[in-house]
Amino acid sequence: MAYHINTGLIKEKFNSPCDCPLCEIKRVVEEQFLHEFLNDAVMETRSRGLVNEYGFCSKHFDMLYKRQNKLSLAVQISSRIFALGDIIKQESSIKGAKKQAEKLKKAQSTCIICKLSDESMEKYYKGIAKLYADEESFAIAFKSTKGFCLEHYSALLEHSINAGFKAKQFVKDLTNLQINSINRLTEDLNKYCQKHDYRNAYKPLGSAENVLPRTKLKLFGKDYE
């Protein structure tokens, strides 16, 4: 179930108007794994083992449930519930109760789709830095974006070394993009707040009209249902 990066997808999303091209890429990656876990992966022993071990987070369970193939979800999640039965058992001591609680807490913190998506996104972060270094046309597209959500901005900073001899310029362009993005948000947030002063009631909001959803995306990334 290895995921190989699609440089065409990178170029497509970085040339499309959006608030975070990496959120758009992540959605495509997630979609692939959502599809696989409701189709081919259902009958694969290794995939079923991964679901048993990691389960699904609430977000990805809901995303799977909203699709048509609910039988596949039931098959997958029944294996996970059965596996949890090895943890949930009768206890007669405080020490045993605490140990069981710790195991359950750990089990609740994992998700196979999150794990696979994160591993795939690591490849995209590295690929973006390499493309920046190797292709001038992509570097231009990169510098023309509106910045990134904080999660993906941080990830690009962490993987900036993959731009090789252009790593310093990559960091400079990346941080400049993000500073400009934050400045635009700050300006629009101020405009939005000032609009609620009666003296500014008739002033147009302009780009500040949707500033709160844009701020949410900047802070937490784009949510998909």
Image (cartoon, rainbow, N blue to C red):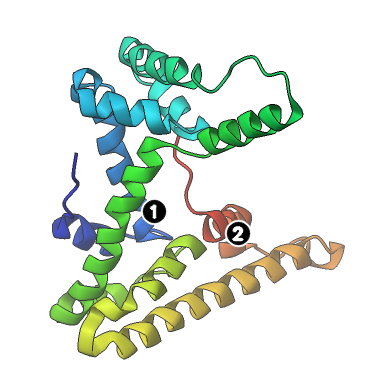
The tag earlier along the polypeptide, 2 or 1, is 1
Please give the name of the residue rendered at 56% of the width and 33% of the height, measured from the top-left corner.
103
Residue 23: which disc?
A: 1
> Is 98 positioned to the left or the right of 56 in the image?
right
**Image-quadrant location for residue 71:** top left
Amino acid at dot 2: Val
Q: Position of residue 101 (x, y in %)?
A: 65, 31
Quarter of the rendering occupied by the C terminus: top left
Q: Position of residue 190 (x, y in %)?
A: 71, 70
Q: Identify the element where label 1 is drawn.
A: helix
Q: Is residue 155 visible?
A: yes
Q: Position of residue 100 (x, y in %)?
A: 62, 29
How many marks the image carries: the answer is: 2
**Image-quadrant location for residue 108:** top right
Given the current orientation, which residue lies at the most extreme top position? 71
Would you name the residue on which mark 2 appears? 211
